[in-house]
Image (tube, rainbow, N blue to C red):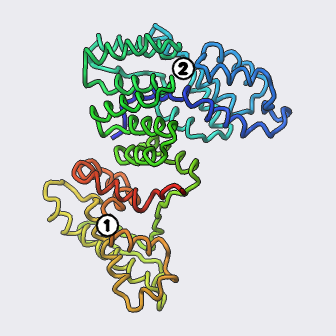
Amino acid sequence: MSEPSYGFIRTTAMVFLLSALVLPGALAQTSTQSPAEGIAPKSDPDRQQALEFIDNGKMAQAMPLFEKLCAEYPKDPGLWEGWGVSTLGYSQTLADADLRKKARARARSFLIKAKELGDNSNLLQILLGMIPEDGGENSFSPRKEVNDVMQQAEADFSRGDFGKAREGYLHALLLEPKNYSAALFMGDVYFKQHVNGSAGEWFARAVEIDPNQETAYRYWGDALWAMGRSVEAREKYIQAVVADPYNNRCWVGLSQWADRTKVKLNWVRLQDKGGVTQKDDQHINITIDPDSLKKHDPTGSAWLMYGMNRALWQGDKFKKEFPNEPKYRRTMREEADCLHLMAATLIGQKDFEKKKNEVDPALVALVQIDKAGFIEPFALLNRADAEIAQDYVSYRNAHRDVIYRYFDEFVVPKAPQ
């Protein structure tokens, strides 16, 4: 379900576009410490120059400054992040594939150093998740001619020659009209040049080519945000998550939108009060937190019913529902069924409405989600493990609108007017 690994190259390009916001912010967070502690002061002229270089996409010029700064201030995680980002950007300008690989591996080592020093920025997490340990890269296309054109266009982009980069991406699209990255990167060129309307048109084309990759939605949201269209940006950021929710990168745009608009995502987390274990076909154990079984606690019976129903699924019910699967696994259908029964048990209790204030707020939210018909998206997103996640693609293909509505109505508040 994750985006092909070539995506990290363009994420690096997007780092260039966002560096004025993200990277200086990371450095500013550390600037309150004294230079004696290994942290660069905000007023350091080399630091300011390095940021200016990276903001203008001049990675080759930024690299030696960040190297010098990291030697002077070895405990500053923001500087190590800057050295990693500039080295990663510089790598794309190298014509030799082996040199590109070595430069990316070196960039990754600088980013790891930043992480060891306490850097936990979204940018750092995204880049570390995308760069293989050996610095390797996948191709943009199985066709050598298309891949060579794309590599050259990427090098032109990284050098700041946007006209040549645009020509290259267009050439790639003429050779391979369904090349997702070529359409995506065309939009990125326009975004870099602040022509956000045209950028959005190209991001839309990338979405048409592959609606199940998150990147084009997220970049489209960035373009809309830059035009002051917050409501439409919210829509694209949600669509990015719907496309590929188990990929951490897809959440960055939505999280940043929430921070900018000063709202908090309403992510309901159930604290399990019971469990089910299976030793063999004949022995299934149900465990319940004894505190939840106290008299007058309305949640005890709900968790008991949840556990009992899960036990049924681990018995014969799974075999009947999934006759073609060789062995039991936890499924979306099982989890949704058990959660639905738990919600029904809660609201079926006498005076539940009067006692709602005494119940775990997450369970009250579950009842509301169940009534609205979103128990399946809740199971897939809020309760997912590696086994439940296997059901996401088929559900998304049939019910993308339901997943979107779940986010729109329950998870992502509207921005204050």
Q: Amino acid at mark 1?
A: Gln
Give the image location of residue 274, x and y in percent: 42, 73
Secondary structure of the residue carrying tag 1 is strand
218 left or right of 323?
A: right
Pair 2/1: label in front: 2
Asked if residue 150 is positioned above or below residue 190 in the image, the reply reads: above
Q: Where does label 2 land, which residue?
A: 89
Disc assigned to residue 223: none
Query: Is any atom of residue 64 visible in this view?
Result: yes
Query: Is any atom of residue 279 visible in this view?
Result: no
Give the image location of residue 201, x and y in percent: 36, 31
Give the image location of residue 135, x and y in percent: 48, 22
Q: Is the residue under label 1 in contact with that under label 2 (CB below 8 Å)?
A: no
Asked if residue 346 is positioned above or below residue 92 in the image, the reply reads: below
Asked if residue 333 is positioned above or below residue 161 in the image, the reply reads: below
Q: What residue is shown at x 47% (from left), y 64% (from top)? A: 269
Q: Mark 1 or mark 2, which is nearer the start of the sequence?
A: 2
Q: Nearer the viewer, residue 283 or 162?
A: 162
Q: Where does label 1 land, which residue?
A: 278
